[in-house]
Amino acid sequence: MEKEKEIQSSTSPFGPIYLYFGSQTGTAAGFCKILATEALKNHFQPIVVDLKLFDPQTFVLPKVAIFCMANQGMGEPTDNAVKFYKWLTSSERLPKTLNQIKFSVFGLGNKTHDHFNAVGRKTNACLEALGAER
């Protein structure tokens, strides 16, 4: 997996868990690394994915996924998550497209901003609308 950083584990009875991040300053990426360490301890095979490498063809494969999503500006996606965010929020997406994905979203932001966690909330709503299971 050239595009995805896989942390190797000799035993991963629960299989892979994908840890996607949209990060501008590195905070969301850092949380994904912490989650990867915890996933290994709990017998998952963590695969950390920078959303700048987002590929719709491989994204729809059945999996367990955690999204660490930060905002920037007026509730906009981070630079590395723009392609993913446009794909996810496209009106061309068919309902139930992502029904093989179990997910969780961890939104990062500053609660004093008017658009606090807008990207995390929108990611959560879109994944659910597309059939993914929270």
Image (spheres, helix red, strand yellow):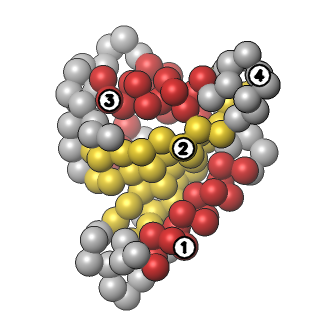
Q: Are marks 2 and 1 in contact (CB under 8 Å)?
A: no
Q: Quarter of the image for the C terminus: give it.
A: top left
Residue 128: numbered disc: 3
Q: CA distance from mark 4 to mark 2?
A: 17 Å
Please report the residue visible at 42 percent of the width from the left and 45 percent of the height from the top. Answer: 104
Label 2 is placed on what type of residue?
Phe
State the SS at label 4: loop
Label 3 is placed on what type of residue?
Glu
Sequence-wise first label, 1 or 3: 1
Q: Quarter of the image for the N terminus: give it.
A: bottom left
**Where 72 falls versus 18 (above or below)?**
above
Sequence-wise first label, 2 or 3: 2
Residue under numbered circle 4: 113
Q: CA distance from mark 2 to mark 1?
A: 16 Å
State the SS at label 3: helix
Residue under numbered circle 2: 106
Label 4 is placed on what type of residue?
His
**Where 43 falls versus 46 (above or below)?**
below
| In-image side of 105 versus 65 (left or right) | right
Residue 37: numbered disc: 1
**Where 28 falls versus 8 (above or below)?**
above
Please report the residue visible at 44 percent of the width from the left and 19 percent of the height from the top. Answer: 89
Query: Depth-wise, is mark 4 or mark 1 nearer the camera?
Result: 4
| In-image side of 128 versus 123 (left or right) | left
| In-image side of 7 versus 44 (left or right) | right
Expressed as whole percent of the image width and height from the top left, the position of residue 37 reads 54, 73
Q: Which of the pair 42/4 is nearer the observer?
A: 42
Sequence-wise first label, 2 or 1: 1
Label 1 is placed on what type of residue?
Thr
Sequence-wise first label, 4 or 2: 2
Sequence-wise first label, 4 or 3: 4
